[in-house]
Amino acid sequence: MSGLYRRGKMYWIDYRVNGRRYRESTGTTKRREAEYVHACRTKEANEGKTPEIKKIKKVVKLFELAKDYLKWTERQKVHRTKKVWVKQLIESFGNFDVKDLKPKIIEQWQCVRLRYNKPSTVNRLTGCLKHMVNKGVQWEMLPEEILRQVRKVKLLEENNKRLRFLTVEECQTLIDCCRDHLKPIVTVALHTGMRKGEVLGLMWEHIDLKHGFILLGITKNGERREIPINTTLEFLFKDLLEKAKSEYVFTDKNGKHYSSVKRSFNTACRKAGIINFRFHDLRHTFASHLVMAGIDLTSVKELLGHKSLTMTLRYAHLAPGHKRRAVNTLDVLLQDRQEVECDQTVSNTLQKNPKQLKTTLKIFK
């Protein structure tokens, strides 16, 4: 039915009276009841009656909205991340009435945050704030006008093209400088391109030594991923399996898996003389060396678990050889065509001039 739509689980209606547009919740999740409300509103509209829409007048503090929002995110994989973002938003706007969050206030807050955070971090927080308000409208805690004003705030321009990777020599130096518990972790990261959370959370049930691959469950992009095990990893996992006392591959002395290796990793980098390098850059190193070795970007994309090729294209400049090969292919094609045309021209000329043909044959004899 035209003018009837769903927002979340609730049915809403959209209609006009005397040229003015009205949208309101039917207050029901049942389509038949919503159709009845819509029919009543349509009849009133045809009679020229202006509807009396109940407006939300309750004052909602941001911390109240945040509380309900976090309960909703518990069902999502990103709950832990959202919890961190919401906590920071409460510190900034907790006692604000949500209706008072005008674009000017949010943009001034963005400017302050930029003194301490990168644009990408500020954008994640801004996006979280917008989503909270959006859910507040869906839950009928907030009027739709608030969402419209929050949506006017634009995201900042980001520059996430940082690409730091190690040379083969630097990789070996880093491994040599790692403590015993860290060496296998860094080795796995360098040979698989797995994310830090995927490496530290790796379990023996994920590793299939018989068929030679690591099977990751639901990853960051929401899909499963298979990563081949090379010879280096095969020997590494077999050695670790002999000493295994936990379902996790990498554990401390108490058998608990590591939640962080930041301190020991930074120490190893300092000993190796490697600066401005993060654990995630091991993933960049894995991808960069594959591309420089001539592996196609589609294969690299599948190994990294990127959802789209756009993310993998950041490594494309490391493989200038494919551009040169493309141009050389064109060069050969054009050259072959020119030679064919030249031979054809000579042949036609010689056929028209028999004397020149005899002279030419003497030269080749």
Image (cartoon, rainbow, N blue to C red):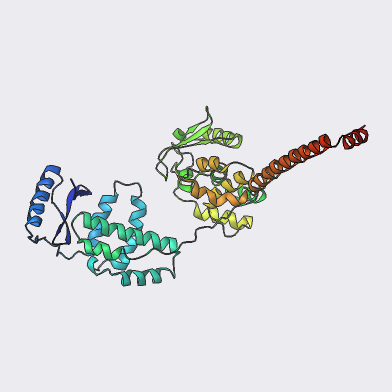
Kindly indicate the quadrant of the structure image that contains residue 339: top right
| Quarter of the figure that contains the N terminus | top left
- In the displayed structure, does residue 307 sit left or right of residue 346? left
| Quarter of the figure that contains the C terminus | top right
Kindly indicate the quadrant of the structure image that contains residue 143: bottom left
Report if residue 313 is visible in the image. yes
Count all numbered tags in the image, as a single digit.
Answer: 0
Q: Residue at x 39, y 42 (%)?
A: 222
- Which of these two is toward me, 233 or 11? 11
Residue 229's spot in the image, x, y percent? 55, 35
- Which of these two is toward me, 264 or 99? 99
- Which of these two is toward me, 22 or 233? 22
Residue 19's spot in the image, x, y percent? 16, 62
Residue 287's spot in the image, x, y percent? 57, 46
Relative height, residue 212 to residue 129 (above, below) = above
- Which of these two is toward me, 212 or 247? 212
Q: Residue at x 20, y 48 (%)?
A: 5
- In the displayed structure, does residue 125 sit left or right of residue 191? left
Q: Residue at x 35, y 50 (%)?
A: 78
- In the displayed structure, does residue 23 sit left or right of residue 347? left
Q: Residue at x 32, y 72 (%)?
A: 104
Residue 124's spot in the image, x, y percent? 38, 59
Relative height, residue 95 to residue 260 (above, below) = below
